[in-house]
Image: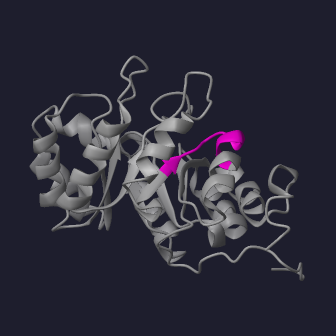
Amino acid sequence: MNYIINNLPQRTPKPRNSGITMMMDKGLSLRQVEDYIEVAGAYTDIVKLGWATSYVTPNLDKKLQLYKDAGIPVYFGGTLFEAMIVRNQFDDYRRMLDKYNLQYAEISDGSIEIPHEIKCEYINKLAQQVTVISEVGSKDVQKIFAPYKWIQLMKAEIEAGSWKVIAEARESGNVGIYRDSGEVRQGLVDEILTQIPEEAIIWEAPQKAQQVWFIKLIGANVNLGNIASIDVIPLETLRLGIRSDTFDHFLDI
C-alpha cells in the first residue's frame, strides 16, 4: 500500500482460500491484460474467460501466458463445458484443458439440463486432472430453487470434488441468488450459510450493491466472482472500508 491507514480489516494473503476476487474477462486484448495486471493484478486471485470466449479470442496462448507470468490462474467459463458436453465432447474438453495447461476448470449446468448424479461424475473425473470449480443454479430466470435444493446440490458437488461452488447470478446479476431486480434473495443466502461453509462458496456479485451486501454480511474476506475488470480495485476499497458504501462497517475493528 502507498501509505498507512489504521484499523482496516485484515485481508487474507495470496494465494487465498477466502477473500477471493474472481475477475471475469469478457474479451480483453493483450495490451488491456498487461495494463490490467499492472493496476489490479495484486488484487486478483483468479480470472475466468467468460462463457466460451476462449474459442474466439485471438492470441489465446499469449493471453494465458500473460496471466500465468503474473501468477494469476485462469479458467474457461462453464458455458464452454456445457457447449462441449451437449455435443458429446467431454474427452475433447479434457484434452483442451491439457493443451492450454489449465489448472482449473468450471463445471456448470446453467444452460442445459444434466442429471445431477452425472454432473457429480464429471466433477469427480475432472478433479483428478485439475482443480474444479462448480456452479450451482440456473441461468433461466424462471427456475427458482428452494433453499434446501441449493444446499443439497452444493453439498453433493463439494463431496464429488469441487474446490469451490459458485452461486449462480449470471454476468448481469439478476438470476439465481438474486431477484430479477438484482436484489439479494436474503433468506436463501442465510439458509445456505447454515449448511455450507462460507469459504467454500464464491458468490457471483457483478453489481456494486451486491458486493456491498455480501461484504457486510460475511466480511472483507468473502469470496466474490464475476467482477468486471474495471471494478476490481473499487471492490478492494469496499473490502477495506475506505469507500462510502462500507465506510462505517469496519470502523469499530
Between 113 and 81, the one nearer to me in the picture: 113
Image coordinates of residue 43 in percent, x first then y, are: 64, 68
Residue lying at 26% horizontally and 58% vertically, measured from the top left: 158
Between 159 and 146, the one nearer to me in the picture: 146
Q: Residue furthest top?
A: 142
Residue lying at 9% horizontally and 37% vertically, measured from the top left: 88
Image coordinates of residue 135 in percent, x first then y, are: 34, 45
Task: Report which quarter residue 132 is drawn in.
Answer: bottom left
Residue 105 visible somewhere in the drawing: yes
Image coordinates of residue 227 in percent, x first then y, are: 60, 49
Please identify the quadrant where the C terminus is shown. bottom right
Is 36 left or right of 247, judged from the image as shown? left
User: What range is drawn magenta here?
Assistant: 203-211
Is 226 left or right of 120, judged from the image as shown? right
Is 99 left or right of 191, judged from the image as shown? left
Image coordinates of residue 23 in percent, x first then y, are: 56, 54
Task: Report which quarter residue 216 is drawn in.
Answer: bottom right
Tally the numbered discs. Answer: 0
Residue 147 to residue 161: above or below = above
Is residue 250 magenta-colored?
Answer: no
